[in-house]
Image (spheres, helix red, strand yellow):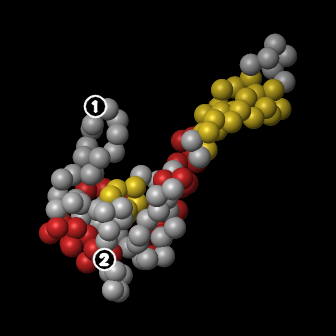
């Protein structure tokens, strides 16, 4: 499990967040560390920040492979209460996009099946049709 090093942030890859490792370039690494603003803390080669701490304009647009990738000069700028608001919004959006309703599939239209993708597992739930 990879967790976020930002103060008061409990996001991790296990919770479905995109995690970004600190840059190898020492100048950029120092800039990221300064923005994290943890007293007497030095990032290691395995220090990560979650996607919540990067503004929208820090991400590449319209990638052919559909992946979210940071721009080469990206800097984390969102921390504290602003990060919590973004986390809450992204969690709500993530749950909304993961619920993929298949619809009624049996001959009597009595049940519907919903597919949920949670924590990298796919679950199918059977529910009564309305």
Q: Which residue is drawn at 27% across and 51% down?
A: 70
Name the quadrant of the C terminus: top right
Give the numbered dot on residue 23: none
Residue under label 1: 64
Q: Is residue 12 visible?
A: yes
Figure check: 121 above or below 102: below
Q: In terms of depth relative to the viewer, which is nearer, 65 or 127?
A: 65
Figure check: 26 above or below 104: below
Residue under label 2: 42
Label 2 crowd (10 A; few <14 / some 14-19 / many >=20) = few
Occupied quadrant, residue 7: bottom left
User: In this image, 101 relative to 54: left or right?
Assistant: right
- Which label's residue is closer to the chain start, 2 or 1? 2
Q: In terms of depth relative to the viewer, which is nearer, 47 or 13?
A: 47
User: In this image, 15 relative to 69: left or right?
Assistant: right
Occupied quadrant, residue 123: top right
Q: Which residue is drawn at 24% across and 60% down?
A: 23
Figure check: 75 above or below 15: below
Give the secondary structure at mark 1: loop
């Amino acid at each position: 499990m990879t967790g976020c090093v930002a103060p008061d942030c409990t996001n991790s890859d296990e919770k479905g967040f995109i995690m970004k490792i600190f840059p190898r370039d020492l100048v950029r690494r120092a800039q990221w560390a300064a923005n994290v603003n943890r007293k007497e803390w030095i990032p290691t080669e395995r220090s990560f920040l979650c996607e919540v701490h990067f503004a929208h304009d820090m991400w590449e647009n319209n990638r052919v492979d559909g992946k979210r990738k940071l721009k080469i000069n990206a800097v984390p700028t969102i921390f504290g209460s602003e990060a919590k608001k973004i986390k809450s919004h992204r969690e709500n959006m993530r749950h909304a996009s993961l619920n993929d309703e298949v619809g009624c599939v049996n001959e009597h239209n009595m049940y519907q099946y919903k597919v949920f993708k949670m924590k990298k597992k796919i679950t199918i739930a059977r529910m009564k049709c309305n």
